[in-house]
Image: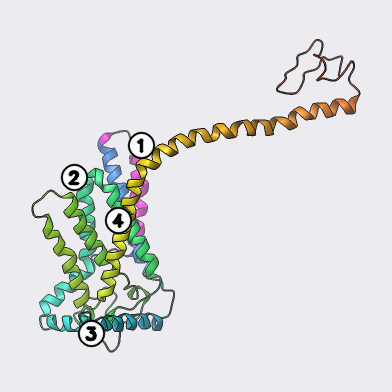
Amino acid sequence: MIDLELTWQQAAGVAAVLLPAAAIAARSGRPRVARAAAFGREAGILVALFGLWQFAGSFASASPSVALDRAAWIWHAERAVHAPSEAALQHVFLPYPPLIQLSNLYYASLHFMVLVGCLVWLFTRHRDQYRRVRTTVVLFTGISLFIQFMPVAPPRLLPGDSMTDTAIQYGQSVYGSVGGFSADQLSAMPSVHVGWAVLVAVVAVRISGSRWRWLALLYPALTTLVVVITANHFWLDGIVAAVLLGLVLAVQAAAREAAPALGPALSRAWPALPARLRPRRAGASQAPAAAEPERLAIHIGPPARGSWEDREPQGGSHDRTGPPVLPARDL
């Protein structure tokens, strides 16, 4: 099978080229070059994020037996609440090899390509919405990576669930020609595939003005079907991803609503803060400087005709806010 994805090493190399090149090009001052630099910067950020996702998948914080125990718990929990059986659904499609092979290819490659296509569309056609969606992608993917450090085995590796590893069966596995328990196969919870698909559908429905935009809802439904019949995810993996994405969107919406009220308060308080601190800082720095000459005068000898505070020095000047300046004959 042709692997259309980048490894984390390849992604890191691409990002290492794109980000510095975009930073240099942004300083050219030419509008076209600046637009190309902005596109290159965003592409570098996304490729770096994808590389981080690939890299994090190669680590696990527990042994494969723990990942299998968690997968078994999910399997039995779904049966306890009478969720549809993933195995029963897969057995409906197994007699049709072309559908299974197409599903394997879909799972291996399409999720990232569609997400990138969505972001490119936003960047070129709806630039005002791009950064918000890009932030959603980063937050959702980052939180998912954090959760995936607690490994959960996919159903295709769980003994006793009667599910077939379809990618191995047809030689389409992105993990190699044989099955196994490498760390990058133990990151089933949550399903980033499903989360990204739901995000793409939400963006298309909310931003696109096309009358056909509601067809985008078929994409997360089809993605959920594919990740189940290929035995890469449980139902719960996709449900958790959708809930997590909903929480990220809710937090972003709450932050946008709070920003208009918080902004003016911060703008009023921030300039006043240094003004209140400035007199204290000046007084603290000037006190030692003013006291030091007086101690020197006491050690050198008693001042003639009163102290510095009692008289104005002759032939000199007296700065009431700083150290006194004495005439030469007094020193």
Q: Position of residue 174 (x, y in %)?
A: 26, 73
In what quadrant of the picture does the N terminus appear? bottom left
**Mark 3 near mark 2, Cβ–Cβ under 8 Å?**
no
Q: Which residue is mark 2?
A: 125
Tag 4's secondary structure?
helix
Q: Which residue is mark 3?
A: 163
User: For residue 27, what is the image quadrant?
Assistant: top left
Of the two numbered discs 3 and 1 on the same chain, state the one appearing first in sequence.
1
Q: Which residue is located at x 14 percent, y 59 percent?
A: 216
| Real-space CA distance between mark 4 and mark 1, rounded to the nearest whole angstrom | 34 Å
Q: Which residue is mark 4?
A: 249
Relative to 170, say whether 34 is above or below: above
Q: Is residue 17 magenta?
A: yes
Q: Is residue 309 magenta?
A: no
* Disc 3 versus disc 4: nearer the observer: 4
Q: Which mark is residue 246?
A: none
